Amino acid sequence: MSAAFIHKLEQYDHLSNSEREVLGRAVVRQGAVGKGEDLVREGDRPSESIFLITGFAARYNILRNGKRQITALHVPGDFVDLHSFLVKVMDHAVMAVTPCTIGMVPHEALREITETHPHLTRLLAVNIVVDAAIHRQWLVSMGRRSALEHTAHLLCELLLRLRAVGLTTDDSFQLPLTQAELGDTLGLSTVHVNRVIQELRKEELITWHGDTVVIKDWPRLQGIAEFDPTFLSLKAEPR
C-alpha cells in the first residue's frame, strides 16, 4: 500500500503494524495510466478498487451535448472508487488528469478486511464519508458561493488534502489542471476562470505559475471562502 494512503489513514487514527501488513497484502498489482485515459468508465462493473499512488485524477460525467462536469478531484493516497465495492455499476467515469501510478485492491480482499478487521473497516469507511462531505461542500459552492469564493474554497481544500499526504511545501502545492479542467470543476467558463485567478493574484492572495500554486495570505483566503476544514476529518482520534 502506498505511503500516501497509509499517511492519509493515520490522519484519521493510528494504524498498528499488523494493520499496515494487511493493507500491504491487499494490493495485488500496480500499473500506469496515461494522461487523459480513464481509470474507470461509466457503466463498468469493477472487481477491484483503485487508489492513486502518484498523479491527479478527476471523477466526471458527460452530458449528451458533450458538456463535462468534474465532480471530484483525486490526489495521491485517494481511492478513486472504493465505493465500487458496494455500488456495483459505476454511474460516472474517472480519468487521469496527469500520468498516474495506481494500485489495485480486489473486492474479495476488501470483503476479507471488512469481515476480519473492524478497525480497518471503519477507517476505510471514513474515506467514503469524507468523499461525501467534500461533495456536500462542492454542492454548496455550486449553489451559493460566488465564483471567487468557490475558487478560494477549492484551493483551501486542496492545500489541506495535499498537506495531509505530505505533498505541500509550506503553503504551496502542485495543481496540474488546465483552465478548461478547472472550469469543468467549478462550473465556470474558461474566461471566467481566468478572470477569477487574476483577481486572486491582484488581491495578493495567491501566486500561480505553471502548476505551482502558492497561498500568500491563508487567513484572508480562508475568510473569503468561509472555509472550515472540519469536513475533511483531519484530526486523528479513536474510531
Image (spheres, helix red, strand yellow):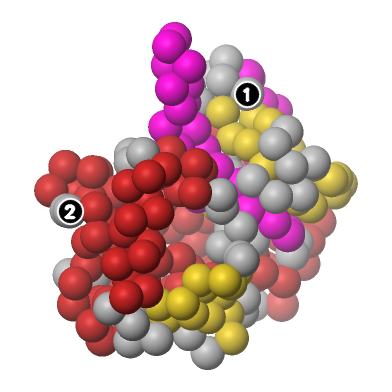
Q: Position of residue 3 (x, y in %)?
A: 72, 71
Gap between marks 1 and 2, in whole Å?
32 Å
Q: Position of residue 200 (x, y in %)?
A: 32, 70
* Mark 2 neighbour class, 10 Å CA radius: few under 14, some 14 to 19, many 20 or more: few
Q: Which mark is on residue 41?
A: 1
Q: Main secondary structure of the magenta part?
A: strand
Q: Is residue 68 magenta?
A: yes
Quarter location, residue 220: bottom left
Quarter location, residue 175: bottom right
**At x 46% / y 77%, what residue is drawn?**
207
Q: Position of residue 124 (x, y in %)?
A: 52, 55
Q: Position of residue 138 (x, y in %)?
A: 29, 49
Amino acid at pointer 2: Ser
* Mark 1 neighbour class, 10 Å CA radius: few under 14, some 14 to 19, many 20 or more: some
In the foreground, 68 or 168:
68
- Mark 1 / mark 2, whichever is N-terminal: 1
